[in-house]
Image: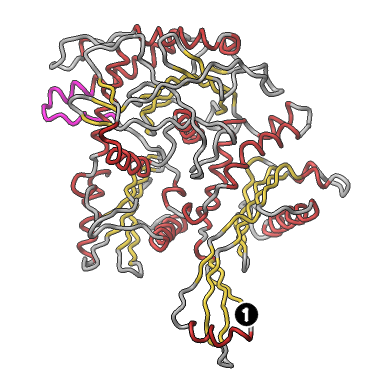
Amino acid sequence: MYGTSSTTTSPKPGNAASSSASSSSSSPSNTPATLGYFCVYNPDFGPTDETQHEQLLYYMARKTVSIDVKMRNIGLAQGLVNFSRIFSPTAPCENVHSQKNRLVFYEAEPGYWLNLCIELGTTNRSVKGTDGKPRIITEYLSHEIHDTVVSALLKQAYAMYRVVHGTMESLVNANDGNTRPLQRHLEEFFEPWVLGWDFEKSMTLERTLDGINYLPLSSGGSTNSTVSNSRTKSGHQNLDRLVKSVRDKYPGLITHSMVTFEDQLVASDIRDEDLRAVWKHVVQLTGYEGTNSALLERKEEEEARKKSKSSTFKFGKSWSNTSIFGFYRSSPSTTTPPSTPPLRPTSRVSSPAPSIRSVDGVMVQGNTPGTLAPSAPTAGTAQSSPRPSGDSEVILTSGGKAQVNPMWFGQSPDSEDVDEYFGIIFKHKSGLCLSFFAPVTEQESQRLIDEPEQFTRELEEFLSSLTNDSAFLDPSETATRSLLEEVSRQMVREATTARSLGGSLGNDKEIRFLYFNKMNLAIKAQLGSMTGKGGVTMGSEMALSLLDIKQDFDRMPDATEITTRSPSNYWIVGKRFEDREVYMIVSRKDSTLVQVEDEVRKLASLYF
């Protein structure tokens, strides 16, 4: 059960009078939850007392501790997990509550465990004891750490690790049982993430659901139905043709693809089990990392502050084929911890996302050209031949850049196995990103190792040469544009339309909502802080209430609607329709339950 624990201490005698005088007016002092330690271990690597230390693969803590302390923590974790199996043989222990700590366990692969210890936040307040003397009471805020969130964070972190490095077991087997390469990968990947974890900001429903931000291809928002239908059909067919043309040109090489616009997924044929992690990895590489709500808030702030200084790029009737791809720009890492584990501790792409300016002119903010030089392919891991590193970029003749990055994901939905691919990523100035994936095991993939620059330049020239099908042109357009140009214009229109989805309800500052679809992991969230009169400010109180409703849905499969009221008199509603869920916060304190249900029906009509 959630709750608080407390300890008491007496102030020094010399300060008793002053403490007593100020106890009634002093406010409690809070300390946030912090990292105790994080470790990865495998009990099979150290079965004897002499080799027990070999179980430890990675350990990170804010305090320096001896190897004996590390091994005691691992032993405690194994003891708790093994003991819980007596009562639950099929579902291993995931969370353990103590007075001062929260322990979280996750078996990422058979035998490979991730173990997290969180030191609970505290609040100190002064009260009078039975003897009339003031005492300091320390309460441990166990209720502020939600089990659902911390368990999800470990699972999400491992999913990202597997996309970047593959499975831990495959790396150990490839090195004949040597765990040193695995230890290096774990340290490289997890260290920035562990040290930058903010538990208070992570306790959100959005972070728990970890949905995919889709950009649906809809009507394009035109009032003319003929033009609207034409654009819709053209958008789908042009996108399909663009991807199919590349796969037909390289039939033995390109096996999978992904199309994104800024941080939104447009289309992909990667299996569902790996789609979310691969999408997030591509978003990181292209510089659009961050939730959609945070991204929009940042864009609005930057637009208001730098409107007069913003450079723009405008789509004309046709583009020159000498400068159609955007640029990657590297910059020093910021102090803000990433929402997902960074790709590398010292180097990451952080190009700002361009803001959409208008629909009619299809004008977007341009990206500043980068100045990175191409880097030669580096030696790969022991399980394969040398390959381009994730930090390598190819400078194309046109002036644009492309990246070739190793990635891991699976083929069959029924298998846990993953295969290594080369991810070939092109970033367009409009925000459109095209990603193509080639299996490392294919003989033709050797070109990506030997001649990455020549291959990406060849692919760019091929994409530039594709022309739009005139049969599906907008009747208002007379000139024939390139296929890539047409697809990019369509993505800009669709992104603008999607941002206005929700109508008056979406713009209502007194109503915040989140929609989630379990089938395709689609998420639409407007839960961010709002300013102005009547706005909703998301605090820990409402965030935890939303998490409780989600947890109740998981525990009660037959429940379809849960409504509660927060201590600040906000209505909080959760409604489920088979595999789809919608959550709402209504800040109208004078609203009745009937009025709140009416608002829920309005929102549900947009999605169901």
Position of residue 309 in the picture relative to residue 342 (left or right): left
Residue at left offset 27%, top offset 61%: 587
Callout 1 secondary element: strand
- Give the quarter of the image for residue 311: top left
Residue underneath mark 1: 9
| Front in this rendered view, residue 287 or 272 | 287
Q: Does 220 appear in magenta?
A: yes
**Image quadrant for the N terminus?**
bottom right
Q: In this view, does 258 lie above or below 11?
A: above
The spot of residue 302 in percent (x, y) is: 32, 39
The answer to whether 429 appears left or right of 4 in the picture is: left
Residue appearing at x 40%, y 7% in the figure: 461
Query: Where 556 sits versus 176, above or below?
Result: below
Instruction: Provide the residue span drawn in magenta.
Output: 217-232
From the top left corner, tell me how far across and down residue 264 is, in percent.
Answer: 37, 33
Q: How many labels does the image show?
A: 1
User: From the image, which quarter does the C terminus lie in?
Assistant: top left
